[in-house]
Each structure stands twice: as C-alpha cells, then as structure tokens.
Image (spheres, rainbow, N blue to C red):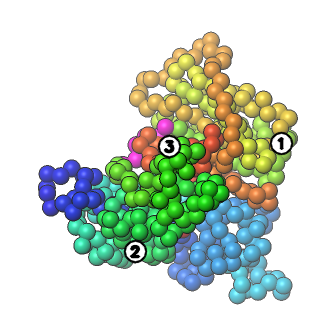
C-alpha cells in the first residue's frame, strides 16, 4: 500500500476501509464478566428496582431479558412486571423462578474500566480511532489492511477482544462511516458484516428506511407517509420527493446511496453539556419543577467543572404534553464558570412555564471555552439575550409514553460530531455523545 497516503483518504482499491465496533449489551456483558454464573440468564442493568424505590429505568437488558419484552430506557416498573427479580420469585409462590431474571445496579466505574481495555485493543489496531461512546468506536484501517483482508481482520479483532477482555463485539466494515454503523448492527449479537466498495447501495436496498444512519422514528414515519418504506426507496427517491426534509433529507438519501465522505476523526471537545430528566407523569407542580431544574443545573455545572469548561450561554428545555419541545436560553457577556449563576438563570427562564404541565425538563450550557484565564467578570450583569425556539420533537432523547419514567439524561455535543442522528425540529440536536444518568446502553 502507498505509505505516503494520508489516513482517511482512499486506498489503492478506491475506497476507505472504515470499521464500526459496537459492544453487545455492554453493561450486561460486564456484569457477566464479573459474575460468570449469570451466563445464559436474563440480566437487567438499571436503577429503581430495590424495595421501596418507585422511579427508575433500564440502562440495558441482555438478549435473554429482551425475550421477555424488556428493553433499554423502559421504566423499571414495567420491566419488573415483564421479568420479575429472581430474588423476589424465590419467596413469592405466585412467581415462577424460571421466568425471572437478575437485576444489577449501574456501576459506571467498572464499565469504564472494561471499556478502557477494549479501547486499548482498538488503538493498537488502527492509527485513526474515533471513540463515540463507552461501548462503540469507529476505526479507519485503510493503512492497515486491504479489502480482501477485511473479513479475516474483523474476525481476528472480535476474537482478540473476547479473548483478552471477555466481552463480545459486533463489527461492521464498509467504505463509509454510515454504512459501517449499520453493518455492525445488522447481525447482532456477536456479528461481523463486511460491505465492500460498490456494494453499499445493494446492502441497504432491502432494509427498513429507519435502518439508515440519521433516520429516527419520526423521520421514518414521515418518509413512509411519502411512500418511502425501505432504504432502497430512499436511495432511489427523486430529490424533489425529499425536498421537504431539507439538508437532512439530502444527507440521509446520500447515505442510503453509499455516498458519505466524512473522515474518521477523533472526538473533539464538547460544544455543549446538558442534563435532562422526565417526570413519571406530566406535572404542573411549581415546586417540583423548580427542584428538578435546580438539581439538573447543579449537575450540569459540576460536569462543566470536571471538563474544565467555561460557558457563555445557559438554557433550559421544557417538554409539555404530548411532546412539544420549548427551549429558552440566555447569553452572558463572556464565558464563566459559576454554578450558582447556572441555577439562577435556569430558574429565571423556567418562570415562563409557571403554570404549564411539564413532562420533561433539561438544562444546558453552551458556547464553551477551555483556555485558562478566559473567565469573564460579570459584576453588574443582570440580564442577557433570550433565545427562544419551539417545536415538536423528542429533542434528542427517545420519546416515552405516560407510564414510563426516565432518570436524568446527560448529553455532550462534540465539536467534530458526525451527522445529526436526532429527529428534525427545533428541539433536536446532535445525539452522538448522549447517554443517561444510568448510561442507557441502547444499541445492544
């Protein structure tokens, strides 16, 4: 191969070789690694399942648990109805122990330690690695292998991860990032799918349109309303058909056609930091809303402190029934690091929604700065510019019905993120770094 070629540029065969590695049901896999006796049993990782607790959510569910209808982001109460805890089934004659599962609390420090072992292997295999979350990453291996070696290389990578770390990975290899992502998900669990140059469009053609990277449930529904049912339909659509979807429509059509020239680049610094939290049911209780916003503001400020980030804009998101997203933001004269100010501004912005029933609340800081000594002096500052946006969208998190509850969601928007994978609408933002307080391991 040409040693002078820059990483991320086409190989001699005419296309980059991009790999997407996705750890299968990662948190559940980590729990099995710690407790090998759980192998083969249904495992649910989440919060709120202990006696006396009433609110919580599933972070991830093993494939055995999914057979019972348990899935990521589901309210823990619903999960327990579908799959009781074994410890409870032992003492309850009305429950069948054989139809129960094991529940474990989220242990992020442990999962991060296992993830670090996996990422170390990935860093050894490629010069260009983009870590997009605790359990997935893109690699550009154009300099390391040729296309006729891709399947053997992927098999060896999967084997090395399982042998060295003890967890399974699904791997997709393709000439583009968007196709590699879909390929890794195509044959889960423990899958390996190689899509060679020139084969992306054929690979996509029979898939449901929602399989295309960047197409979420709302966009998929709107595309189906236009008669676009499959990825093949999207690839073959006349540009006029998708004109109502704007730039996003052009992008997803290009992905379905195999056109995606984005290079694999390491993740940069955050553009914004946010936390969100949903109520079990919509509430107009002023004290409850203020308490929730104050808690989220403190959490966001703490995250900014840990990231050594200053922020110039403070905003809130208010989701009212059924799924109306309202955002408000206030810009400061310059970047600061002031937890009390985050809380004060967020609560001030919330006042507009004093009487509104609310399903979900969020707090965000943005326009971040990281250079030392950049903090502004805000003495005498009283108010800034309010930025407003209203829309109908899930704003970058999964929509939930009224019986479900989700604890706080932590989102990190990165400077060099790939395409926006959230739903269209003024409430939607980039979702590539998004995880929850329980770190929802939703991809499985």
- 254 to the left or right of 287: left
Residue 72 versus residue 264 in the image, above or below: below
Prevailing secondary structure of the magenta residues: loop
Give the image quarter of residue 427: top right
Residue found 62% across the figure and 15% down from its top:
381
Task: Please state the total of marks drawn on the protein image.
Answer: 3
* On screen, residue 26 above or below 336: below
Q: Nearer the viewer, residue 239 or 85?
A: 239
For the C terminus, which image quadrant?
A: bottom right
> Whole-percent x and y of residue 301?
59, 36
Q: From the image, tell me which residue sits under label 3.
A: 247
**Is 283 placed left or right of 349 in the picture?**
right
**Is residue 28 part of the magenta span, yes or no?**
no
Residue 343 placement (x, y as % from top left): 67, 31
Q: Earlier in the sequence, mark 1 or mark 2?
A: 2
Residue found 69% across the figure and 74% down from its top: 69
Marks 2 and 3 sit apart, C-alpha to C-alpha, by 32 Å
How far apart are the alpha carbons under marks 1 and 2? 47 Å
Element class at badge 1: loop
The residue at which mark 1 appears reads as 357
The part of the chain drawn in magenta is 266-271
Q: Position of residue 71 (x, y in %)?
A: 65, 68
Q: Which residue is mark 2?
A: 192
């Amino acid at each position: 191969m040409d040693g002078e070629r820059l990483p991320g540029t086409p190989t001699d065969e005419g296309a980059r070789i991009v790999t997407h590695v996705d750890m299968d049901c990662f948190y559940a896999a980590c729990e099995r690694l710690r407790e090998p006796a759980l192998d083969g049993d249904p495992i649910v990782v989440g919060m709120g399942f202990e006696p006396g607790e009433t609110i919580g959510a599933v972070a991830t569910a093993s494939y055995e648990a999914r057979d019972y209808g348990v899935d990521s982001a589901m309210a823990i109460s619903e999960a327990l109805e579908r799959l009781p805890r074994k410890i409870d089934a032992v003492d309850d004659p009305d429950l069948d122990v054989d139809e129960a599962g094991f529940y474990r609390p989220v242990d992020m420090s442990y999962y991060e330690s296992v993830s670090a072992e996996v990422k170390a292997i990935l860093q050894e295999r490629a010069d260009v690695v983009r870590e997009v979350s605790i359990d997935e990453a893109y690699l550009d291996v154009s300099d390391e292998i040729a296309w006729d070696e891709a399947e053997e290389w992927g098999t060896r990578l999967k084997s090395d991860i399982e042998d060295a770390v003890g967890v399974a990975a699904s791997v997709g290899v393709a000439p583009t990032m968007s196709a590699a992502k879909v390929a890794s998900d195509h044959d889960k669990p423990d899958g390996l799918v190689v899509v060679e140059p020139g084969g992306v469009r054929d690979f996509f053609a029979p898939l449901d349109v929602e399989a295309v990277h960047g197409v979420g449930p709302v966009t998929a529904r709107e595309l189906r309303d236009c008669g676009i049912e499959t990825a093949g339909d999207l690839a073959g659509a006349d540009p006029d058909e998708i004109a109502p979807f704007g730039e996003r429509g052009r992008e997803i059509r290009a992905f379905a056609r195999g056109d995606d020239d984005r290079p694999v680049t390491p993740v940069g610094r955050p553009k914004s930091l946010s936390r969100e939290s949903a109520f079990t049911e919509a509430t107009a209780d002023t004290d409850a809303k203020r308490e929730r916003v104050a808690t989220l503001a403190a959490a966001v400020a703490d995250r900014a402190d840990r990231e050594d980030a200053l922020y110039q804009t403070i905003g809130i998101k208010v989701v009212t029934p059924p799924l109306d997203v309202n955002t408000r933001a206030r810009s400061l004269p310059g970047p600061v690091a002031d937890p009390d100010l985050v809380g004060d501004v967020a609560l001030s912005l919330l006042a507009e929604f004093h009487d509104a029933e609310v399903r979900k609340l969020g707090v965000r800081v943005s326009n971040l700065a990281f250079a030392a000594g950049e903090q502004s002096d805000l003495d005498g500052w009283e108010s800034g510019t309010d930025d407003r946006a209203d829309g109908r969208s899930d704003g970058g998190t999964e929509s939930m019905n009224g019986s479900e509850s989700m604890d706080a969601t932590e989102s990190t928007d990165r400077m060099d993120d790939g395409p926006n994978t959230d739903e269209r609408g003024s409430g939607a933002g980039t979702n590539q770094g998004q995880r929850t307080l329980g770190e929802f391991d939703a991809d499985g």
